[in-house]
Amino acid sequence: MHPQLQTILDDLAAARERWQRLVRNTPDARWHERRDPAQWSVAENIAHLNLSARAMQPLLDDAAFRAKALGSIGAARMKPAVFGRMLAKLVGPVPRVLGFAMGKVKTAAAFVPEGAQPRLEVSAEFERHLAAHQKAIRAADGLPLDQVRIESPFVKGATYDGLSGWAIVVRHIHRHLDQAERIWG
């Protein structure tokens, strides 16, 4: 496995472990409950990740398809664009200073979860996305993902390379797992 993709896979595996711990530690009675009316519930955080995955996965699959046409890079180091690297850092868990969240961002309306979807439904979809992400990253091994661009479904006009796209997806998962863990933890 290409070292840069392996790093993303390792980060995804860590997210899966956090997810499994969150599922074990969140009783049904608290799944949809907001501890703070201004913050999402555990269910809403996971539903948001599902909405995000539905938007990103086809773009990343297409990026891998286009990268395949460029040929294999083997173990050569990929060079993600500065904007993509920066965005991947920004969408990770929100740093806290003296208990205050720094760098919160308003979510675009299309990615705000609506209604209280059943726990099993939301969880099963999230599990499918985690498995699809892992499979797609493995399938992209050796491809020049840094040489193909995708347009962000979240910010109109913003583009980044495919490698950054995967890093963004996984760091975003950690951000919302972090938020979900803080609700009742």
Image: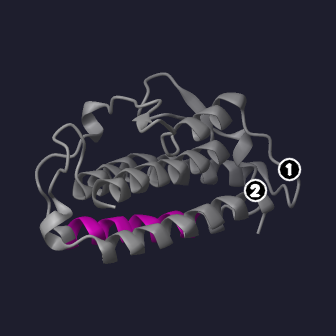
Question: Dividing the image into 4 quarters, which one contains the N terminus?
Answer: bottom right
**x and y, in percent, of residue 53 in the image:** 40, 53
Q: Earlier in the sequence, mark 2 or mark 1?
A: 2
> In the rendered structure, which segment of residues is drawn in magenta?
120-136
Of residue 119 and residue 133, the one placed in the foreground of this image is: 119
Residue bearing mark 1: 77
Of residue 96 and residue 33, the one placed in the foreground of this image is: 96
Tag 1 secondary structure: loop
**x and y, in percent, of residue 49 in the image:** 36, 52
Of residue 79 and residue 86, the one placed in the foreground of this image is: 86
Q: Is residue 5 above or below residue 86?
A: below
Q: Is residue 67 left or right of residue 142?
A: left
Q: Is residue 70 left or right of residue 163?
A: right
**x and y, in percent, of residue 9 in the image:** 63, 65
Residue bearing mark 2: 4
Does residue 150 appear in the picture of this structure?
no
Circles 2, 1 touching at the beta carbon (< 8 Å): yes
**x and y, in percent, of residue 115 in the image:** 11, 50
Tag 2 secondary structure: helix
Residue pictured at 46% horizontal, 54% vertical: 173
